[in-house]
Image: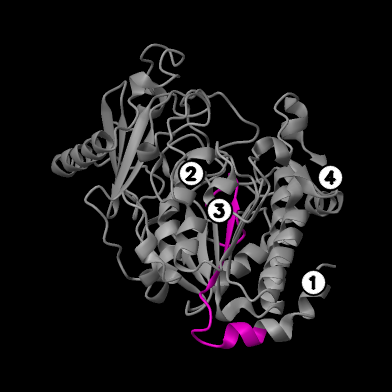
Amino acid sequence: MFLSSIRRLCATALFTLNLPGQAPPNFILVLTDDQGWSSLSAPMDLNRPQAKSDYHLTPNMDALLDRGMRFSDGYAASPVCSPTRYSVQFGKSPARLGYTRVLGDNRADHNQVAIPQVLKAVHPNYRCAHLGKWHINASPDRYRYDLHDGRTTNKQGGFSQLDHQREWGGYPQTDPKRVDSLTARAVDFISDSLRQERPFFIQISHYALHSDLVYSEATYAATRERAKGTLHQNPAYAAMIADLDRSIGALLRAYDAMGLSQNTYLIFTSDNGGMPCLPIQANKGKPYQPGLNAPLLRGKWDLTEGGIRVPFAVMGPGIQAGTQSATPVISYDLLPTIAELAGASTALPKNLDGRSFASVLQNPKTTIQRPPEGLVFHFPHYNVVGLNEPHSAIRVGDHKLLKFYSSKRALLFNVSQDPGERINLAKKNPELTSALNSALEQYLDAVAAEKPRESNSWEKGGRGATTTLFLSRYQN
């Protein structure tokens, strides 16, 4: 096992990391793919203990939450994968970057400053690695990654799309979704960095839980023996998440064996919300009953909470175990947060949307000073497997506005009290609805965000088709 080599380094690692002020901190960012907020066997919100899976077993991810701070209101920057990955690297929203959908034109300027460049500008000795799914249309070399897998996409993780029975029915592999080899290689990189006495940043971008559904034979056999739940019932998917959990468990054991807790932050989150149903359905805005991300509404491809609220947790030095914060945080906050923790804030690029949540890690009740627009999400496209209408969203404080462009309608929710987005408050709170709509429009105009009619999906969506089936549930 690859942990044998780690133990030989423990004495050196402990000596190096336990000396205060001797080195900047290390960072391990684990980014999963399509992982839903309620997909774990522990809740992301301790105040909602039932908001978890009744079939999936994720003891290692649960342990990660317990060992640090979980964010009940953690968000992905986009309801689809690639735009969020841009946001992670560059600290900006997909709307500002000009890339809001995986298909179609990519208007993003790839001459950007990313996490490794920020860290190395202040601490040139940093070693930086990206392993797994990249999904950015420029080489990681450009952003000064020392080790990487190149311009990888879903394909390298086993995404077939040509055989839907195979894609959604599932099949076994010895290294499903590369979960074992990704962690083994990450541990080797960390070991080498410690041996060289150099601080490190590594992003482990898992191909799981994106389709195809791939699992190990042993895990699948064990999963089939358990009783299915009411919310989650797919044994292939449950086995895949269990294999991912096993991989994260190996990473946690390595973290402990190398004595990293004194100087290494481990960040865990997902690129977007989970699949709303299995297999995929072209439902054109029809409701999912109840949907795999319950109690959240819907899932991937939508700006409803199920599509953008995701698992989000951090463990590491100075973070009290078992804590929880309701402070909203988002993918594009990672760059400024890592920069502040590393003492590299002076190297931050201009026009960031992200704000550091480093202070929240010390006090979970701390609020983040954001611009008036708060958090902004933009998906100006039709998508038959989603709401099938271009829409945007904004969250300020406890309230979130969903704006639909074809139907010219807005929905207002208190997502702190109503994360399932059941009660539309727009008519009862016209002033707040108007204020949020204005803030949203001003931000989108300021960053020259793509307009719905500029979207390559506008005509394909049906020349102004609306989300009648979805919006009909909100009569108040």
Question: Looking at the image, do the residues carrying marks 3 and 4 touch, with CB atoms under 8 Å apart?
Answer: no
Q: Position of residue 90 (x, y in %)?
A: 44, 49
Q: Which residues are magenta?
A: 14-42
Asked whether residue 361 appears in the rendered view, the answer is: yes
Disc 1 to disc 3: CB gap under 8 Å: no
Tell me which amino acid carries mark 4.
Gln
Mark 2 sits on what residue?
Answer: 86
What separation in Å lies between label 2 and label 1 (alpha carbons)? 32 Å
- Do tag 2 and tag 1 residues touch (Cβ < 8 Å)? no
Q: Indicate the secondary structure of the residue bearing disc 2.
A: helix
Residue position marked by numbered label 4 in the rendering: 173
| Camera-side residue of 73 and 201 | 201
Residue shown at 47% from the left, 25% from the top: 105
- Tag nearer the camera, 4 or 1: 1
**In front: mark 3 or mark 2?**
3
Mark 3 is surrounded, within 10 Å at the Cα level, by few (under 14), some (14 to 19) or many (20 or more) other residues, namely some
* Secondary structure of the residue carrying numbered label 1: helix
Which of these two is toward me, 54 or 93? 93
Say which amino acid is labelled 2: Tyr
Badge number at residue 330 = none
Quadrant of the rendered image containing residue 198: bottom right
Say which label, 3 or 4, has the lower sequence index.
3
Give the labeled residue for mark 3.
Answer: 144
SS assignment at label 3: loop
- Confirm whether the magenta stretch covers residue 428: no
Q: Which residue is mark 1?
A: 3
